[in-house]
Amino acid sequence: TDLRPLDILSEVVPAGGLASGMRVFKVQGVRGFQLAASQPRALVFPASRLFVHCDRFPEEFSIIVTLRVLSVPAKRNEYVFTLMAEESPSVLVGLRYAPSKLHFLFWSQEHAGGWQTRVTFPNVSISDNQWHTLILAVSGQSFSLTVDCSIPKDVVVETPFPASLSVKRANFYLGNRRRRKGMFTGLLRQLVLLPGADANPRICPAMNFKVATLSVPTILQDFPVKPVSNEVLQYPYETDTKVTLGSRPPCTKQEKAQFWFNASQRGLYLCNGSTWISVLEVKQRLDYVEEYQNLLTNSETMGVEVFTIPNVGLFAATANRYTPPGSAIYKWTDGKFVPYQNIPTYQAQSWKYFTIGKKIFLAVANFEQNNRGQEFSVIYKWSRRKEKFVTYQRITTHSARDWEAFVIDGEAFLAVVNHREGNNHNIDSVIYRWNPKTGFFETNQTIPTSGAYDWEFFTIGPYHFLAVANTFNGTSTRIYSHIYIWLSGSFQLFQSILTFGAADWEVFHIGDRVFLAVANSHSYDSGLPAPSNFYAINSSIYELNITAQMFVKFQDLLTYSALDWEFFSVGDDSFLVVANSFDGFTFSVNSIVYRWQGYEGFVAAHHLSTVGCRDWEAFQTAEGSYLLYSSAKEPLSKVLKLKTT
């Protein structure tokens, strides 16, 4: 059998049109077929169309399915496809699902006495109205199911798949087994047979695992097929459209699905029933960066967090070194940040804004003890009545540097970086889990860290990761920082990367590519000769290699005691800005904005004058795009405006 993908779904679809009993729907931005239960025999074609040179079903193969399944009633089975001989009611090969189960069926005359064999994969949850891609790999007695490129489920059965299964006078039936009972009721986007190979390596490098594509009918692809001859291709999901010119028109339910063309900005917008959504517009390009506001702070600022409280406004929280007066929260008012609230803190290092349901929180990482000798970091809750943040929960920490908030499977977590306890830098940092019954965070897991500075949480497909920036182990900054993966209810070591006084991790995506940048602050090892400059050191960008299942180095950039990376975009362009803090001689060091140049990687585009730069935050308002940097060496932070063309 030829090893090319055999597109079962495309065989049902006539060129430039649809088969009887099929409709196209677009859900969650993805197109799929809905099959009419009243016409099961219309969705059929002879197996000889696929098996042109050989009338035997392949002995080893993969089946790739992308589908969206509605809730399935208990005890109900629905068929994705079947292969049946004309004269027999038996299923030669078939795939069906039930609530929380997937069944693969095959007929084996010689090994099973003429009985049908059913291979069942339990605990397969796809009936959730979401798109999923399934890969079923078959080889002898081994059957493997991969859902959305997650960990495969393997099943070994007594009866192997037949080495010689005849498909003479057999037909493929799409979404049924030649009768209405068990008809597929969801949406089907992809159904491909790949002979002789496990399809996982070909499918799973894709970033969007749930709709990973090997072969999809033309009518379901992002760009419509050209009309046949002079005919106008009609899609069943198309409706009459209207384009309005001139100033912004109203967007209500009456204008839903209508377009507005803004001639002055050369932008095309679509009404979704309440707001105009940009469909096509001339993308802005970054021209230069200008100083916009000098933000006087209570004292030197170790970190800054910009956040938006719905229906209230845009805020910036500065983590200030000294108490009194503590740290401050500023509100964006009339195009500037103005003081809004002061909060007592103790050598605050950073803030983290997060929400749990309708609750709004702001956590501060305190580095020193309070005036009673107690060492706490504090979680504050937004009071809608007072329109202020009020103390909610105190958590014992040890020279805390950073908080990271994240959600896994609907559960909220909060991780703190403990830098040191006394002179001991090799201590545990802690991950807390939100207890919805008590309404407080409780210890969930501890992870050993070494003088750690930063946590970075990120998700890739079905996997969740947490990276720690280890800075100093008591004798050296030349130590490993670690990336952990969430497995079986806890974080487990995934990869270790050698870093040099790592102060920050920044994860970002460019297209389908995933990158992870580390800010290396200085190189020191008590057992090695001193370098000529401890602080002029490469910081590195790593890229996820899915085949190798690890991050590999992509690019080194010379930095000067780098303490932070911030990724941002302007139009179609991507940028990284680094916080250079000290070059070995002075704290007045240029921080640099790097522009993504494709195969060249990141190239320096703008040099920004900074003093002891500690942290960057990118944000947007109706007036434009901005960068905010904090200075750890003077009580002055700055807002910079991105000027575009």
Image (tube, helix red, strand yellow):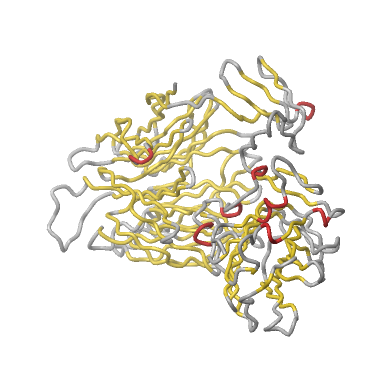
Q: Position of residue 269 (x, y in %)?
A: 64, 26
Looking at the image, is 82 positioned above or below residue 206? Answer: below
Q: Residue at x 44, y 33 (%)?
A: 573
Image quarter of the N terminus: bottom right
Q: Position of residue 89 (x, y in %)?
A: 82, 71
Q: Is residue 97 visible to the viewer in this orientation of the structure?
A: no
Looking at the image, is 556 positioned above or below residue 548? Answer: above
| Quadrant assignment, res 173 | bottom right
**Left or right: where 62 falls relative to 424:** right
Image quarter of the C terminus: top left
Q: Nearer the viewer, residue 147 or 65?
A: 65
Looking at the image, is 39 positioned above or below residue 79? Answer: above
Q: Position of residue 421 (x, y in %)?
A: 35, 63
Q: Nearer the viewer, residue 234 or 247?
A: 234
Q: Nearer the viewer, residue 596 or 344?
A: 596
**Left or right: where 468 falls relative to 311:** left
**Left or right: where 507 falls relative to 420:** right
Q: Residue at x 57, y 46 (%)?
A: 390
